[in-house]
Amino acid sequence: MSRAAQGDPHAQRALVERIDRRTRAIALAILGNHADAEDAAQNTLLEVLGAAAAYRGGSFLAWADRIAVRTAMRFARKRRLREARHDSDAPLEQLAVEGHSPASHDVPRPIVDYLAELPETRRVALVLRHVMGYSIDEIAELTGVSPNTVKDRLLQGREQLRKHIRREIAIGVPRSGSRS
């Protein structure tokens, strides 16, 4: 880490290779949009390299995850502001709906599509808990809210996901494909 902080290109490349895939997964899970996730992942890698000198030990992956989560959340806020400005001028029928990615097991659409429909706070809580495996207390620390707020967001987010999935199954929405 100290070599990466000093600008050693081999150490920096090794560091990036270690977290690149994980960073992209975090960004995609939080943002639900491949283009934004790619941008957020690139920014995360740059931030990790820039902050390498500030690393004080402990779990390197947890440290990098915190940077990835904060970066993705910043992108989500910027996107929300950008869309709010754009959407305020556009008629509803012109608003684009993102395309579908390969479906998961028993649901009509990929879970990431359902996650994208959730409010950001619930989506972030679900991703951090169920994708990244963080504890309630860790999520509270990462997001700057109380553990009870995290629990509520998880409960409400799971219920909202179930409701959307059940509704689509009940009305017979065809699955969008399957993974090979």
Image: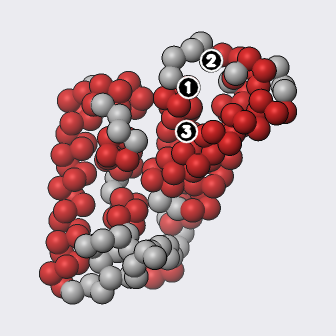
Q: In the image, which disc is placed on residue 60?
A: 1
Badge 2: residue crowd in 10 Å (few <14, some 14–19, many ≥20): some
Which of the two residues, 172 or 120, is positioned nearer the viewer here?
A: 172
Front residue of 71/53: it is: 53
Name the kind of residue labelled 1 in the image: Phe
- Image coordinates of residue 57 in percent, x first then y, are 57, 14
Closer to the camera in the image, 51 or 75: 51
Give the quadrant of the N terminus.
top right
Q: Residue at x 69, y 34 (%)?
A: 15
Query: Can residue 44 be seen at all in this image of the molecule?
Result: no
Q: Which residue is mark 2?
A: 55
The kind of residue on which mark 2 rests is Tyr
Do the CB atoms of the residues marked 1 and 2 lie less than 8 Å apart?
A: yes
- Sequence-first tag of 3 and 1: 1
Report which quarter residue 163 is drawn in.
Answer: bottom left
159 left or right of 40? left
Q: Is residue 79 left or right of residue 173?
A: right
Q: Compare marks 3 and 2 and give the one earlier in the sequence.
A: 2
Q: Which one is in front, 18 or 142?
A: 18
